[in-house]
Image (spheres, rainbow, N blue to C red):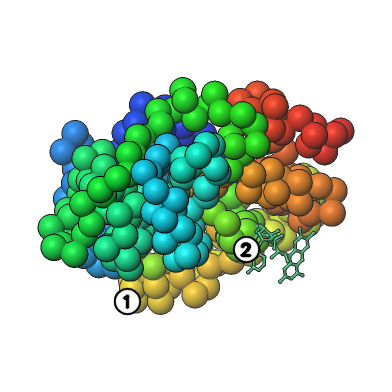
């Protein structure tokens, strides 16, 4: 068995360089721990397979921010009457809005209301920047032409230059977090975010690619030379023995039933800065679970470094 500390990585280069499909693939492969299969051509077939299997939360792992102008206010009225639950919108002028969301949210709208001019215009534009995600929808004869609607994708520099009240709603940050299963169980309770998690159903930790062993997260509660740590370590060793024994005759999804909360897992979290603020406010606080607070206190300084204008009010949580 292996014991590691929790950690995280910010994956923002994909956003700043507009590589939506690569970002989606990188996140999706965390579920299967098949990042070694990424090549220059692997994103389209991977994403097609994901869509075919209906695992569409994978295509939530990116963000598109658009400035949309229409000839008539009716275009926006019709759109907002749909109550698009997973988009953010800010009025920025007469018949002009910034609208953002992940590719899945716009894909769903194209299926739900293809006849709306705004929905058609957005789907047609996005089918150029992430074609694989829209290829099965774009030939729908009911998809509106987008007449009277101008849509422009904002690049990362334009998004980052938005006033702070707009920045927090439209800018997302994607984090790859390594923690134990108890922490991810708490993290996914935050509903205004997108998640993908390493799957214990598919990952067979007995295989050579996983080192033939189970990885656990060092508990923050016990000092390494304490009797409590020894008890914890023995329990993990025993668990690993049972897990590997079960794998001799059973599938990973069956064997995982003996794995404990301390098991290491990886989770991708894509959330707006507004939701990150909310998560950090609750989870870096002294009232939070210490294991959760441990990772949040690593993340908070990085957020402060990247977006001080947003996260400064949370600095006091680090004291
Ligand atoms: C110290 C602490 C102890 C906790 N203990 C427990 C516990 O014992 N048991 C337990 O089950 N959970 C517990 N939780 C989890 C907690 O109840 C929330 O589920 C979790 O923190 C998610 O936060 P949230 O609900 O504020 O918002 P998020 O899900 O992060 O959503 C952000 C905001 O969106 C809005 N929102 C989102 N979804 C809805 C909705 N469906 N309806 C209305 N508004 C919505 C709210 O304004 C919300 O603040 C605990 C959390 C903390 C921080």
Gap between marks 1 and 2, in whole Å? 34 Å
Q: Residue at x 46, y 34 (%)?
A: 11
Q: Locate ligand 1 by image quadrant.
A: bottom right
Q: Residue at x 82, y 38 (%)?
A: 317
Residue corresponding to mark 1: 249
Q: Quadrant of the C terminus?
A: top right
Q: Residue at x 16, y 38 (%)?
A: 41
- What is the quadrant of residue 70 in the picture? top left
Label 2 C-beta lies within 8 Å of the nearest ligand 1 atom: yes
Give the left or right position of residue 144, taking residue 175 as reference.
Answer: left
Is the residue marked by circle 1 packed among few (<14), some (14-19), or many (20+) residues within 10 Å? few
On the image, the x and y values in percent for residue 275 come to 63, 48
On the image, the x and y values in percent for residue 289 come to 76, 56
Q: Residue at x 65, y 24 (%)?
A: 305
SS at mark 2 in the image: loop
Q: Closer to the N terminus: mark 1 or mark 2?
A: 2
- What is the quadrant of residue 141 in the picture? bottom left
Disc number at residue 189? Answer: 2
Is the residue marked by circle 2 packed among few (<14), some (14-19), or many (20+) residues within 10 Å? few
On the image, the x and y values in percent for residue 23 come to 35, 40
Q: Are marks 1 and 2 in contact (CB under 8 Å)?
A: no
């Amino acid at each position: 068995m292996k014991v590691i500390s929790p950690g995280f990585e910010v994956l923002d280069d994909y956003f700043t360089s507009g590589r939506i499909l690569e970002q989606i693939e990188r996140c999706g492969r965390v579920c299967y721990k098949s990042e070694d299969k990424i090549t220059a051509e692997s994103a389209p077939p991977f994403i097609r397979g994901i869509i075919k299997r209906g695992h569409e939360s994978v295509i939530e792992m990116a963000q598109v921010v658009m400035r949309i102008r229409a000839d008539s206010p009716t275009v926006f009225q019709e759109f907002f009457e749909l109550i698009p639950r997973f988009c953010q919108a800010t009025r920025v002028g007469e018949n002009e809005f910034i609208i953002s969301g992940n590719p899945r949210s716009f894909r769903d709208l194209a299926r739900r209301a293809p006849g709306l001019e705004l929905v058609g215009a957005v789907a047609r534009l996005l089918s150029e920047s992430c074609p694989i995600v829209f290829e099965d929808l774009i030939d729908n004869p009911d998809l509106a032409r987008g007449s009277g609607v101008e849509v422009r994708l904002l690049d990362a520099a334009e998004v980052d230059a938005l006033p702070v009240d707009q920045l927090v709603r439209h800018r997302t940050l994607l984090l790859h977090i390594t923690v134990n299963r108890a922490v991810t169980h708490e993290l996914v309770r935050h509903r205004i975010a997108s998640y993908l998690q390493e799957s214990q159903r598919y990952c067979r930790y007995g295989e050579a690619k996983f080192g033939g062993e189970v990885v656990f997260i060092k508990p923050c509660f016990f000092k390494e030379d304490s009797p409590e740590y020894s008890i914890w370590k023995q329990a993990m060793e025993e668990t690993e023995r049972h897990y590997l024994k079960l794998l001799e005759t059973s599938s990973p999804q069956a064997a995982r039933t003996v794995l404990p909360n301390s098991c290491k897992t990886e989770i991708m979290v894509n959330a707006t800065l507004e939701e990150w603020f909310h998560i950090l406010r609750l989870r870096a606080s002294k009232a939070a679970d210490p294991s959760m607070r441990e990772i949040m206190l690593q993340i908070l300084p990085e957020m402060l470094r990247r977006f001080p204008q947003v996260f400064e009010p949370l600095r006091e949580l680090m004291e």
